[in-house]
Amino acid sequence: MASSCSESERVEQVISELSRGRDIADRIRVMLRQTGSDGSVQILVRQLLDTFNHSLTVLTHAAADDSGEVSQAAKSEDSCKPPPPPKDRRGCYKRKRSSDTTIKMSSDLCEDGHAWRKYGQKAILNAKHPRSYFRCTHKFDQGCQASKQVQQIQDDPPLYRTTYNGQHTCDKSPLNHHHILPTPPDSSIIWSFNRPVDSVKQEEVQIKSPSEDDYMSPFLDLSGDVYSCTASTHSIEDVVGSIEDFLNFNP
DNA sequence: TCGATTTGACCGGG
DNA sequence: CCCGGTCAAATCGA
């Protein structure tokens, strides 16, 4: 892992190229449908689309994992502070399972329409930059369970990964945030891992989809460089793991 | 003064 | 036992 910075840049380029390939394949699929072409050809094109989507998923995951190689030499112990009083916080919180998680890759920290309150920051092993933890400002007054993590995964150009957890149940405008971004999302990649009962996200898919047919890939492709993946029964790790297995046949 | 952020400690899953 | 996620006291700033 000597040159992971340039490596992540290359990964981004590959992601971009794969996106184009996926779009082209998608257009071919539409044309085949319109011309009533051979069903077996359509299946092949569908598989091609899946391959593009799988590859994009793996690369995004790899870019995130690979984004740092720097030492965690920031563990400086402060010895000049008085010892804090002992606190018993056993059982004071439960770690959440990663259900209903949306990962957004973005070149800037654009506003998503919700009020967030930062509650923590942590240096992550093998990551250059610390990860910041946010929860909805209305967590306590309205019980909103939404939270997000933001981590810079690349320096030049800056690339941020924002992981959204949970749904906003607060009064603020719910969940149109992908559509009300002040800047066009063409520099972002959004991966949504949702259950099919998640009507809000499904609506998002419908809005973004080019209103076509009944393409039944588990990977729903959206317009532009925004992608969504529906994982009906799997966790993100399961999906990514199976994709990685799949890609072992396509190195 | 009060809400937001920072930061080190604590907890628990893997 | 390591490391990521969360808590909460200290600090900041409007």
Image (spheres, coloured by chain):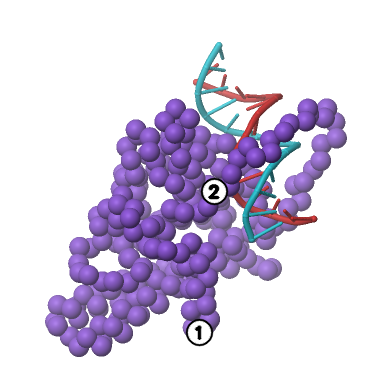
Chain colours: A purple, B cyan, C red
Percent position (x, y) of residue B12?
65, 48
Instruction: Report the front residue among A16 and A53.
Output: A53
Instruction: State the residue position of label 1.
Output: A249
Point out the image quarter for the N terminus of chain A.
Answer: bottom right
Q: Residues within 10 Å of mark 1 (few under 14, many from 20)?
A: few
Is residue A250 depicted above or below A62 in this figure?
A: below
Horizontal side of A70 relative to A133 (left or right) equals right
- Nearer the observer: mark 2 or 1; the answer is 2
Q: Residue A20 vs residue A8: left or right?
A: left
Foreground of the two, A47 or A160: A47
Is residue A14 found left or right of A174 in the rendered image?
A: right
- Secondary structure of residue under mark 1: loop
Vertical arrangement, residue A13 with respect to residue C13, above or below: below
Q: Find disc 2 in the rendering and name its residue.
A: A96
SS for callout 2? loop
Chain ID, mark 1: A
Frontmost residue, A74 versus A92: A92
Whether labels 2 and 1 belong to a single chain: the reply is: yes
Residue C4 drawn above or below residue B1: below
**Residue sitting at the far left:** A35
x and y percentages locating residue A84 in the rendered image: 78, 29
- Three-letter amino acid code at disc 1? Phe
C-alpha separation, residue under disc 2 versus residue under disc 1: 34 Å
Residue projecting furthest to the front: A91
Instruction: Count all numbered tags in the image, as a single digit.
Output: 2
Q: Quadrant of residue A182?
A: top left
Occupied quadrant, residue A52: bottom left
